[in-house]
C-alpha cells in the first residue's frame, strides 16, 4: 500500500468533513435561531434569506465527505455506516425536511404557512445539530466491533438497536451538547454579520453568551482530557466571545469557524493512525493502513479529485462572493393586489 497516498486522501477526507461541519454549522444555527430571534415575519424571512442562496451548496460537502470516505477507505465507511445506520437515516430525513421548509417557505403568500415552515426548519435544524454531534462523539468513543470488523449489539436493544447504542454513550451526549453550542455560536455570529437592524442586534446579544459557554466547555474538556485541539478550540472560542462583545462580527465568526475546524480535526484524529477504535475486548480497530483502498483505486480517485474538487471550491467561493450583501430585516412594503408573491429566499439589498 502507498502510505503517502493514503495519508493524502485521509487529509482530503478530513478537509471535506471539516468544510461540511463549518458551513452547515451556521446553516443549522440560523435555522433555529432565525424563528426565535425574528420578531416579525419580515425579520424571520430575512434570517432565511441569509442562507437561502448557499445552504444546498453547503450540503455538497456532505456528499463529498461520504464519497471520499467510501472510495478511499471502504472499511472505515462500512464500519461508520453499519454502526450508525439508524441515526444516519434520521439525518437524511431531517435534511429533507429542512430543505423543503426553506424552499417551500415562500411558495405560498400566507403567514400561517410561513410560520409552519419556520417551525419545521427550526426543529429539523436543532435536531440535526444535536444528532451530528452525538454521532461524532460516539465515533470518538468507539464502536463495538469484533475481530472481523463487524459492529455488534452489546446492550438490551438487540441487533436492530446496535446502531442506536453508540448514541447512548457519554461521549455522544458530550458531542451533542458541544455541537448545539457551536451551531448556536455559528448561527448567531453569521446572522449578526449578514443582517441589519434589530435582528442583527439580537443575534449579537446571543453570540456573546454562546461563545462564553462553548469556551467554558472546551476548557473543561482540556482539564478532564487534555488535548491540543481542545486547547486550541478553547482559545479560539474565548477570542470569539471577546470579539462578539466588542461588536467585531467578522472576527467573531472567523474565530468560531476556526474553533469548529479544531474540534472536527481533533475528533477525526483523536486515535490516529486508528480511524475508529473498538470498545470490545479482543475486537479489531479500523486503522489507516487496514482501511485504505488499493493503490490502483487511490490513484484513480486522485485523477478524478484533481478535476472535481477545485471546481467545487471555486463555485462555492464565487457564490459566497455574489451573495455577500447584508439582508435587511425591516418590514416589507405591501405588494399591489394581484402581484406574485416574492420568493422566500430572495437576496435582500
Image (spheres, grey):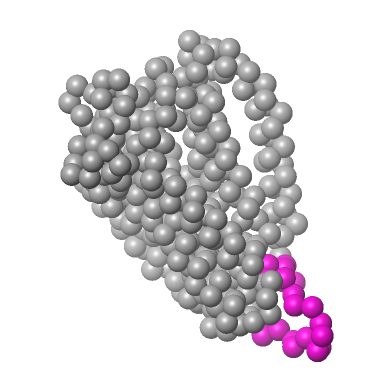
Can residue 35 be spotted in the picture? yes
Q: Quadrant of residue 12?
A: top right
Q: Is residue 288 above or below residue 100?
A: above
Location of the C terminus (image quadrant): bottom right
Q: Nearer the viewer, residue 10 or 63?
A: 63
Identify which residue is drawn at 43% across, 51% down: 90
Q: Which residues are magenta?
A: 331-349
Q: Quadrant of residue 237?
A: bottom left
Total count of labels: 0
Identify which residue is drawn at 81% across, 89% down: 337
Q: Is residue 249 above or below residue 310?
A: below
Let me know if residue 11 is in the magenta part: no
| Left or right of 281 on screen, residue 134 | right
| Magenta-colored segment: predominant secondary structure | loop
Can residue 178 be spotted in the picture? no
Identify which residue is drawn at 28% across, 52% down: 173
Residue 20, position in %: x, y?
Answer: 53, 46
Amino acid at each position: 500500500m502507498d502510505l503517502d497516498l493514503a495519508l493524502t486522501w485521509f487529509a482530503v477526507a478530513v478537509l471535506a468533513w471539516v468544510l461540511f461541519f463549518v458551513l452547515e454549522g451556521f446553516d443549522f444555527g440560523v435555522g433555529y435561531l432565525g424563528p426565535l430571534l425574528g420578531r416579525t415575519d419580515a425579520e424571520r424571512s430575512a434570517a432565511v434569506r441569509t442562507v437561502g442562496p448557499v445552504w444546498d451548496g453547503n450540503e455538497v460537502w456532505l456528499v463529498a465527505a461520504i464519497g471520499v470516505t467510501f472510495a478511499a477507505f471502504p472499511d472505515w465507511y462500512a464500519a461508520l455506516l453499519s454502526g450508525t445506520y439508524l441515526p444516519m437515516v434520521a439525518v437524511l430525513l431531517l435534511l429533507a425536511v429542512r430543505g423543503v421548509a426553506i424552499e417551500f417557505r415562500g411558495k405560498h403568500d400566507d403567514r400561517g404557512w410561513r410560520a409552519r415552515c419556520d417551525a419545521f426548519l427550526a426543529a429539523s435544524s436543532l435536531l440535526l445539530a444535536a444528532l451530528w454531534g452525538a454521532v461524532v462523539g460516539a465515533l470518538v468513543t468507539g464502536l463495538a466491533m469484533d475481530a472481523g470488523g463487524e459492529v455488534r449489539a452489546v446492550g438490551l436493544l438487540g441487533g436492530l438497536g446496535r446502531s442506536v447504542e453508540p448514541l447512548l454513550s457519554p461521549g455522544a451526549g458530550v458531542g451533542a451538547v458541544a455541537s448545539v453550542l457551536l451551531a448556536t455560536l455559528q448561527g448567531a455570529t453569521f446572522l449578526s454579520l449578514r443582517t441589519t437592524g434589530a435582528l442583527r442586534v439580537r443575534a449579537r446579544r446571543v453570540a456573546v453568551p454562546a461563545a462564553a459557554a462553548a469556551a467554558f466547555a472546551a476548557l473543561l474538556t482540556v482539564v478532564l482530557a487534555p488535548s491540543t485541539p481542545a486547547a486550541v478550540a478553547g482559545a479560539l472560542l474565548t477570542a470569539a466571545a471577546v470579539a462578539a462583545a466588542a461588536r467585531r462580527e467578522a472576527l467573531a465568526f472567523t474565530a468560531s469557524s476556526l474553533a469548529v475546524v479544531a474540534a472536527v480535526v481533533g475528533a477525526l484524529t483523536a486515535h490516529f493512525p486508528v480511524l475508529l477504535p473498538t470498545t470490545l475486548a479482543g475486537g479489531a480497530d479500523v486503522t489507516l493502513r487496514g482501511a485504505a483502498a488499493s493503490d490502483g483505486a487511490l490513484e484513480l480517485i486522485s485523477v478524478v479529485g484533481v478535476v472535481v474538487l477545485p471546481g467545487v471550491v471555486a463555485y462555492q467561493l464565487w457564490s459566497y462572493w455574489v451573495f455577500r450583501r447584508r439582508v435587511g430585516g425591516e418590514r416589507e412594503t405591501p405588494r399591489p393586489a394581484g402581484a406574485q408573491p416574492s420568493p422566500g429566499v430572495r437576496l435582500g439589498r
